[in-house]
Image (cartoon, helix red, strand yellow):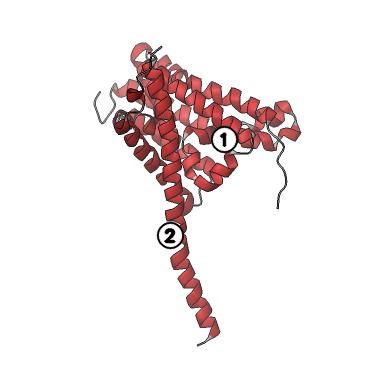
Amino acid sequence: MDIDWSMVFDWVTLLKCFLTGGIICIIGQILIDKTKLTPARILVIFVTTGAILGGLGIYKYLVDFAGSGATVPLTGFGYNLAKGTIEEVQQSGLIGAFTGGVKSAAGGIAAAVFFGYIASLISKPKMKKQ
Amino acid sequence: MNPIESKETYKTYVDKKSPPSTIVKNCFNAFWVGGLICTVGQVIFNICKERGFDAQMSSTIVSILLIGISAFLTGLNLFNKIGKFAGAGSLIPITGFANSIVSPAMEYKSEGYVMGVGGKMFTVAGPVLVFGISTAIIVGIIYLIFNTQSITLV
């Protein structure tokens, strides 16, 4: 199958993606350096923020602008949950609020659980250095 | 010059000078590593698009690949090195989610494969899923009540 590599390496898209993704990471880095928040809390904050912004319909503009620059950071995971929920609510009402989110993030969650477990099994035990 | 005074001056000088410069350096590293991870995701996304997957499926494939790669890099103790250098640059992208699953699981491997690995996997990922999914459900219920996304009125 032929792949149009000029479309794959479209510089404008990649640059927008790089800048947006980088800026979101800078926000995270400032939170780490300036506050006493643990990484776990920062991850929770990012996912929740993404879900709220997704629910408000704001995050969609960022995704349209930056593509993976907005969906790969964890805010995008939250956005994905919220988007799936809203789409499912439109189709099947209240029950959609419970099925939609996980359904649209299912691939990521399942991959994280599966690969996470396999990778832990094959991991080398940590060497005590220093 | 009084030695204590000069020590204090030195201390205030260090306090004034050192944190911003580390933050600037950390932010710069976070920026380009994070941006690079997102760009890799975009390249995978574009390839999937070219092969005829729709946008939703393509971004799922991107998540699965990035999660898989970073899980195994964590298992091989390589991800920690990237993480030390890049800080939030590798934590905030979905790679950090995979890393947060594997690192506690590795640590508690000695407690067994069910409660050790299987249980501790979710020390960090558990809260992320709890709050992410709960927020999404609340968003869905609010949407159902008001039948609108308040700002855009979609």
In the image, what residue occupies the spot 35% across and 40% down?
A19
Q: Earlier in the sequence, mark 2 or mark 1?
A: 2
In the image, what residue occupies the spot 30% across and 28% down?
A64
Could you tell me which chain the residue with mark 1 belongs to?
B
Q: Which residue is mark 2?
A: B20
**Percent position of residue B36, x then y:** 43, 37
- As helix, strand or loop, the secondary structure at mark 2 comes to helix
In the image, what residue occupies the spot 40% across and 27% down?
B43
| Quadrant assignment, res B119 | top right
Q: Which residue is mark 1?
A: B99
- The quarter of the image holding the C terminus of chain B is top left
Mark 1 neighbour class, 10 Å CA radius: few under 14, some 14 to 19, many 20 or more: many
Q: The residue under label 1 is which amino acid type?
A: Asn
Seen as rendered, the residue at the extreme bottom is B1
Mark 2 neighbour class, 10 Å CA radius: few under 14, some 14 to 19, many 20 or more: few
Front residue (pair A18, B146): A18
Could you tell me which chain the residue with mark 2 belongs to?
B
Seen as rendered, the residue at the extreme left is B153
